[in-house]
Amino acid sequence: MSAGDEALVRLAREELARPAPDAARRVAAAICTRTGNATLGVVFYGSCLRRDSAEGVLDFYVIVDDYAGALGPGWLARVSDWLPPSVFYIECPASDGSVLRAKYALLTLEDFARGAVSGGFRSGIWARFCQPALAPWVRDEAALESIAGVCAQSVRTAVETVTPLLEGPSDAEEFWQTVFAETYRRELRSESVSTIRSLHAAAPERYERALRAGLAACEQERLFAVEWSGPRFALEWPAGRREKLHRRFRRRIAWAKCAYVAQLLKTAFTFGDWLPYALWKVERHTGAEIPYTERQRRHPLIFGWPLLFRVLHNRELR
């Protein structure tokens, strides 16, 4: 392991081992009651972590030994193995009696690690875990080390994947904004420039540290040479390599979008009671309360779509 890789693992381990807020611990405990002894670790990430807030929907990844152990031996375990991750919704009480809302993606450690390496069509794992995360629950020290290794690899993959897209010298802020903009494109997620900037602005020193370690790891493997001038860096590529990697990234965008469409369709079957959740999101963003019937809640794929059409027709969802 290179010095850069070791620095990335140290960074990931420090972040994962930070004290978790009470809301994250409560949700992690509720998730573990579902996934049982198969659970290796519960990892908290995303906007609620970044804002240090339980307002909204908390985001988690749940790492397990195997799908059948966490989900039972039925069709859900089989489809999770075929097209991971499976995404679920959960609610649990907060310390003040309010409701904590969360969603979690469930993956085996093998699939988690596979999603963090470069070369695949999908960027969902490494795009999320090149960002700060913490682990409110892990089974043991070995589990923490394994998850930290995946988070470290995610930063390395971000560097390997996005550096060919840079035009000329750059700095940490420019680099990470390119990372987030490109990965949102692959996930069919439309985010404003201000939102993308806010990701780096939440922890600029951390992102500087991660970038320098990632560049050092890639340089040690002779992917490119790095020349620093203050906070800015320039890359010297072997002849033809940058262009080859750039073309490969662009070719994979269409396939990545197809994979995410398939994932979204599967999530409609695994997310659980998603109609109240979706309408709660609309109400939270617009103030428009949309009533629904028990039949629509119980059979949303059959009877729930008219609500969505009504929201769009009335321009309640912006």
Image (spheres, rainbow, N blue to C red):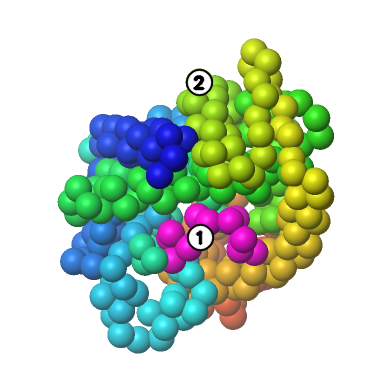
Is 131 colored magenta in this rendering?
Answer: no
> 92 or 168, which lies in front?
168
Measured as percent of width and height from the top left, residue 164 is found at: 74, 44
Horizontal arrangement in the rendering, residue 154 relative to residue 234 (left or right): left
> 22 or 68, which lies in front?
68
Q: Is residue 122 above or below residue 7?
A: below
The residue at which mark 2 appears reads as: 205
Looking at the rendered structure, the kind of residue marked 2 is: Glu
Looking at the rendered structure, the kind of residue marked 1 is: Gly
Measured as percent of width and height from the top left, residue 195 is found at: 65, 33
Q: Residues within 10 Å of mark 2 (few under 14, many from 20)?
A: few
Q: Which residues are magenta?
A: 111-123
The quadrant of the image that shows the N terminus is top left
Q: Residue at x 64, y 69 (%)?
A: 259
**Marks 2 and 1, how far apart in space?**
26 Å
Horizontal arrangement in the rendering, residue 128 relative to residue 141 (left or right): right
Q: Is residue 177 above or below residue 148?
A: above
> 244 or 147, which lies in front?
244
The residue at which mark 1 appears reads as: 115
Q: Is residue 177 shown to the viewer in this render?
A: no
Closer to the N terminus: mark 2 or mark 1? 1
